[in-house]
Amino acid sequence: MKTGLVLEGGGMRAQIDYLRASASLPFVSRIVEIEGKKYLDGGCADSIPLEAFIKIGYGLNVVILTREKGYRKKKSRKRGACYKAGYTYR
C-alpha cells in the first residue's frame, strides 16, 4: 500500500473510486483497489498534505482550520491505530 499520492483526472468512475478511497479509514472500511493498486484514506499519514501540493507546483494553498485560534492537539500517550497496524509513511 502506498501513501502520499495526489491523483488528478480520470473519468467519472475513476473519480468516484478515488473519492471512496479517500474516505476509507483503516480498520473501519474496506481497502479500495484501483487499477491493481490498493488505497485508503491518507489522513493517518498527512491530514493536511500541504507539502505534497507545493511539490507538484501549487503556489497558493488555502487551509481552513475548524478549531478555535490557538488550539493545539495534545500529544497522545498511545500510538495511533495506523502505527499499531504496521503502516509506514514517507
Image (spheres, rainbow, N blue to C red):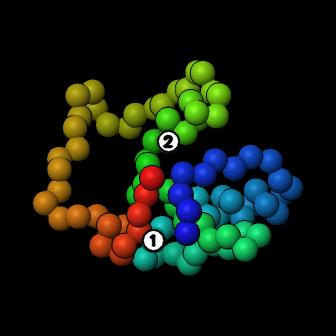
What secondary structure is marked by label 2?
loop
Q: Residue at x 65, y 28 (%)?
A: 57
Give percent across and percent down for residue 48. Answer: 45, 42
Question: Residue 80, relative to residue 62: is it above or below?
Answer: below
The numbered dot on residue 26 is 1
Pointer 2: residues within 10 angstroms few (<14), some, or many (20+)?
some
On screen, residue 32 versus residue 4, left or right, reads right
- Image quadrant assignment for residue 54: top right
Badge 1: how crowded within 10 Å, few (<14), some, or many (20+)?
A: some
* Discs 2, 1 touching: Cβ within 8 Å: no
Whole-percent x, y for residue 47 in the image: 43, 48
Residue shown at 32% from the left, 37% from the top: 67
Whether residue 23 appears in this view of the structure is no
Taking depth in this image into account, of 56 and 16 the one nearest to the observer is 56
Residue 9 vertical position relative to residue 76 in the rendered view, above or below: above
Label 2 amino acid? Answer: Pro
Place of residue 11 in the rendered image (x, y in percent of width and height, measured from the top left): 86, 55
| Callout 1 amino acid | Pro
Name the one closer to the observer, 22 or 66: 22
Q: Nearer the viewer, residue 53 or 64?
A: 53
- The Cα atoms of the two marked residues, 2 and 1, are separated by 18 Å
N-term-proximal mark, 2 vs 1 = 1
Q: Is residue 5 above or below residue 24?
A: above
Secondary structure beneath disc 1? loop
Quadrant where the N terminus is found in the figure: bottom right
Q: Residue at x 63, y 27 (%)?
A: 58
- Image quadrant in which you'd find residue 16: bottom right
What numbered label is drawn on residue 49?
2
Q: Position of residue 2 (x, y in %)?
A: 56, 62
